[in-house]
Image (cartoon, rainbow, N blue to C red):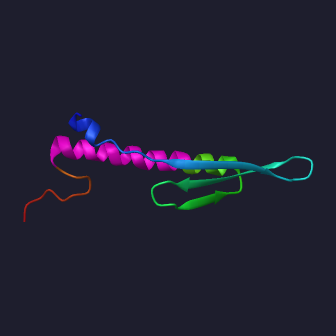
């Protein structure tokens, strides 16, 4: 396994979608469970669930990019590089 592959992360999620009676138009609801720690987040709409997924992916991607930058520069983002 290469060094790059060793730093790859994963995000395992269980997505549950269902319909509730909304009168003439059924309402879609969603919940997302993080497999690693069992944390569950509920959503009143599928749109909100998709926004959450996008934010989770963005955070994961940013974390990976920061790790690559730190590997290439030897400096973590936000780390003070000035010597006392």
Q: Nearer the viewer, residue 81 or 27?
A: 27
The reply to whether the magenta stretch includes residue 67 is yes
Residue found at the far top of this picture = 2
Residue drawn at 41 percent across, 47 percent down: 60
Residue drawn at 22 percent across, 34 percent down: 2
Residue drawn at 86 percent across, 53 percent down: 21
Residue 31 lies in quadrant: bottom right
Q: Nearer the viewer, residue 73 or 13?
A: 13
Quadrant where the N terminus sits is top left
Image-based side of 76 in relation to 26, left or right: left
Q: Position of residue 34 (x, y in %)?
A: 51, 55
Residue found at the far right of this picture = 24
Residue found at the far left of this picture = 84
Image-based side of 23 in relation to 55, left or right: right
Residue drawn at 48 percent across, 50 percent down: 56
Chief secondary structure of the magenta portion: helix
Give, as a single range, the part of the protein colored magenta.
53-74
Image-based side of 52 in relation to 84, left or right: right
Q: Position of residue 37 (x, y in %)?
A: 46, 60
Image-based side of 2 in relation to 56, left or right: left
Q: How many marks?
A: 0
Q: Nearer the viewer, residue 64 or 39?
A: 39
- Work out whether 39 lies above or below 69: below
Quadrant where the C terminus sits is bottom left
Q: Position of residue 74 (x, y in %)?
A: 15, 47
Q: Position of residue 39 (x, y in %)?
A: 52, 62
């Amino acid at each position: 396994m290469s060094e790059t592959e060793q730093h790859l992360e994963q995000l395992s999620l269980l997505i549950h979608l269902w319909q509730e009676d909304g009168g003439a138009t059924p309402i879609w609801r969603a919940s997302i469970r993080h497999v690693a720690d069992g944390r569950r987040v509920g959503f009143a709409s599928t749109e909100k669930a998709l926004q959450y997924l996008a934010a989770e992916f963005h955070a994961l991607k940013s974390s990976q990019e920061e790790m690559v930058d730190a590997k290439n520069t030897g400096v973590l983002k936000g780390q003070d590089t000035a010597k006392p």
